Amino acid sequence: MAIEGPFWRAIAVFRVASLVYAVVLLAQHRGYAEPVLGWLVILAMALWTAGATLAYAAESLRRWPLLSADLAVTLACLLASPYVQGTLQTATGTMPVPATWMAAPVLAWAVRHGRRAGTLAALVVAAGDIWSRSGADEASVLINETVLLLMAGWLVGHVARLAKQAEERMQRAAEMEAAQRERERLARDIHDSVLQVLALVHRRGRELGGEAGELGRLAGEQEAALRELISIAPPAPSGTTDLRSLLARYGSPAVTVSAPATPLLLPAETAASVAAAVGAALDNVRAHCGHDARAWVLAEFLDGAVTVTVRDEGPGIPQGRLEQAAADGRMGVARSIRGRMAELGGKVTIVSVPGQGTEVEITLPA
């Protein structure tokens, strides 16, 4: 991943700086008890610093073999310290020959594979450090170094994992944005061509009647289906559903569905229940007003609540008709509409005037 690049460059800088520090320590102590062996260890560290820096720069090489070799070389240099330092190893304040350089593979494992791998590498390096200094009477120093290694492995792994997750989210957002732009472009092209033709055929067919009227009706249905297809919004967040996409399915030449331009996100089950209640209301329109009766569905978000209104221009509901239907065991409105919304904490308001149609308003806290 591109986000790993800065981490590997930082580790490379850390290796070089730690190598310089190890050189200074070795020179300060005049090569310890075995100067030749000490400078050979420094040479090995320098060669591995150059090789590891080049290898980690290639993303294809950041695999288990390289990481394992990094750990093995570090342990070899660390375990050579007692032979280089001899009796000076037990002196107070003496550090192993690699000094801070031994933390480099811990950081590499953490960046590549996260907190657990970084912690595991820290434990391996700490065990090697403790063994190489087993004769030194500095238990508190060893404990502090071990804790620092563990914290470095865990913390760097955690930060690296967060950075990778952020990069993945940004990439998905960029892909969604590009897909949305392409969808909008296609929608404009279709709207300016195909939909205009279908709308014209629908209108002229209804005016001419007969077989032309049937063609006009089919054109109207295809226009509604095509409008629904090109108006599909980007995928909703996990566990939620855009209520607009569910309501758009009810659109037809006889049913006009209007919704805001912004998503109406609800929990998936809640959105399905609202859409089912709207479907039940439209079924009542067809049952009592005829299959060709006009109906309008309006969805909106107001004052922290989602409101969906279903209106028709039918004969209306006579006074007391709903109560009588419930008493007779016909529970369409009571269960399919009011019952669903009551379970979700919403409410249903039905306003009907004989001869002027019916309006069903469903309100649900968002």
Image: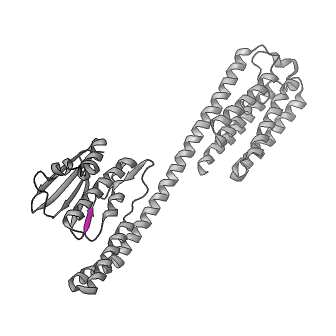
Q: Is residue 344 visible?
A: no
Give me the residue at 23% from left, 63% from top: 287
The correct choice, above or below, for 123 with respect to 1 in the image is above
The x and y percentages for residue 333 are 23, 52
Query: Which residue is at the front of the view, 97 or 64?
Result: 64
The x and y percentages for residue 125 are 75, 30
Query: Which residue is at the front of the view, 28 or 329?
Result: 329
The x and y percentages for residue 222 are 35, 74
Does residue 222 appear to the left or right of 315 in the view shown? right
Does residue 44 appear to the left or right of 115 in the view shown? right
Q: Residue furthest top?
A: 137
Q: How is the image coloured?
A: one colour
Query: Which residue is at the front of the view, 89 or 157?
Result: 157
Q: Is residue 209 visible?
A: yes
Classify the position of the C terminus by image quarter.
top left
Does residue 171 appear to the left or right of 260 in the view shown? right
Query: Which residue is at the front of the view, 337 or 132?
Result: 337
Magenta stretch: give its range: 252-257
